[in-house]
Image (cartoon, rainbow, N blue to C red):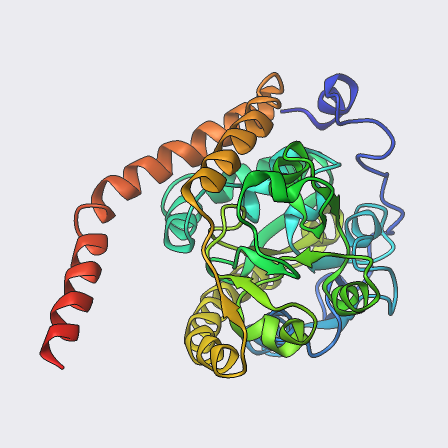
Amino acid sequence: MDRRSFLKTSAFGGASAVATTTLAAPAYAQGKRTLTMVTSWPRGLAGVWDAVEAFAKSVTDISEGQLMIEPKAAGELVGGLEVFDAVTSGQADMYHSADYYFVGQHPAWAYFTTVPFGMSAPEMMTWYYGADGMQKHHELGEIFGLKPFIAGQTAAQGGGWFRKEINSADDFLGLKFRIPGLGGEALSKLGASVQTIPGGEIYQALSTGALDGTEWIGPWADEKLGLQEVCDFYYPAGFHEPNGAMTVATNLEVFDDLTTGQQRAIEVAASSAHQGSYAQFMASNGPALKRLIAGGTQIMSFSDDVWDAFGSASKEVLDGYMDDSLFADIRASAEASMAATSGWSGRSDNIYTAQRDRVLANMK
């Protein structure tokens, strides 16, 4: 799709969708480069900042020092939710974030983090690397002057932390809840007062009563953030983030000015960070959940009627964007890949895992 045509015709276009870059073509494009990367994360934030550092180190290693990345934590150059505009305008060279923060630019960005009742982490990886997910990401990014690659993966995220039990969908009426992306839009349809704030601000908002509950990532990252200190009830399974991909996106003019080897270093480092991040979260969540339980956190499950309400609201949100051809195209691509993948895994991996756990439990 032509970038200019999109901006003229899309309901999500206009001045807020993209700004003309102010970056001058560097004279040293064939030599060593240092790129400024703004992020949506505070320094040291469990898992997500690790992905930032892993990506930056890999770029340097792969390029043998010809390309270096200088990460900026949220607030050091721009706010955590301002990184998209900073890169499209040329204020920074690249960002590391979760693309569903930018559904205000275009709702299809959500598919490159997660959508409610969407793909699991393995399904996301299959779509992105084995089908046309990466191509769709690049097509969307080009419209906004970006070259994006997924570069982190939290795995399935928890349903959230609450001050009180959720016994029915009515309990979301008026509930002040932090949740971004299209999942947040779905909860809004159930009457929740939805807020999108950066991860570094969640604890304080809960402590002061500005929030009644929140989702963040999973047991390990949530424990590090201290959410168990301000909420008693934790729901490990949620509808809104069955995977949690993160993205590195480079200003397209900056990316095009890099050498082929430097461009390849960004792509390979992003893939490596994605894989390493997934392994880190998966290895850390189980032990963290045990610690939370030992510390008194009450582990809960949503009832079937709540899940049904989540499903109806999510379908309404997704269907509401289908008049946008770009959204419809990306949704169709993602759902076709998900269906193909689950058609096999549902009859192999899932059955094996359930039977393995049953058999091993009986052998103890």
Q: Is residue 356 found left or right of 116 in the rendered image?
A: left
Q: Is residue 279 above or below residue 143?
A: below
Q: Residue at x 11, y 73 (%)?
A: 362
Query: Residue 249 location, x and y as percent?
Result: 67, 53
Q: The N terminus lies in which quarter of the figure?
A: top right
Residue 194, percent from left and from top: 73, 44
Residue at 79% in and 54% down: 81
Residue 283: image x %, image y %? 42, 76
* Residue at (21, 61) in percent of width and height: 353
Q: Is residue 212 above or below residue 111?
A: below
The image quadrant where one finds the C terminus is: bottom left
In the rendered image of this protein, does residue 268 appear above or below residue 304?
Answer: below
304 vs 240, nearest the viewer: 304
Residue 177 horizontal/vertical position (percent): 70, 51
Q: On the rendered structure, is 54 left or right of 229?
A: left
> Looking at the image, can residue 85 be seen?
yes
> Is residue 264 at least partly visible in the picture?
no
In the image, residue 256 above or below residue 297 = above
Q: Nearer the viewer, residue 232 or 95?
A: 232
Q: Residue at x 76, y 60 (%)?
A: 198
Task: State left or right for residue 5 relative to residue 321.
Answer: right
Q: How many marks?
A: 0
Of residues 33 and 281, the one drawn nearer to the viewer in this rendering: 281
Quarter of image, res 57: bottom right
For the residue pair 281 and 73, the one nearer the viewer reads as: 281
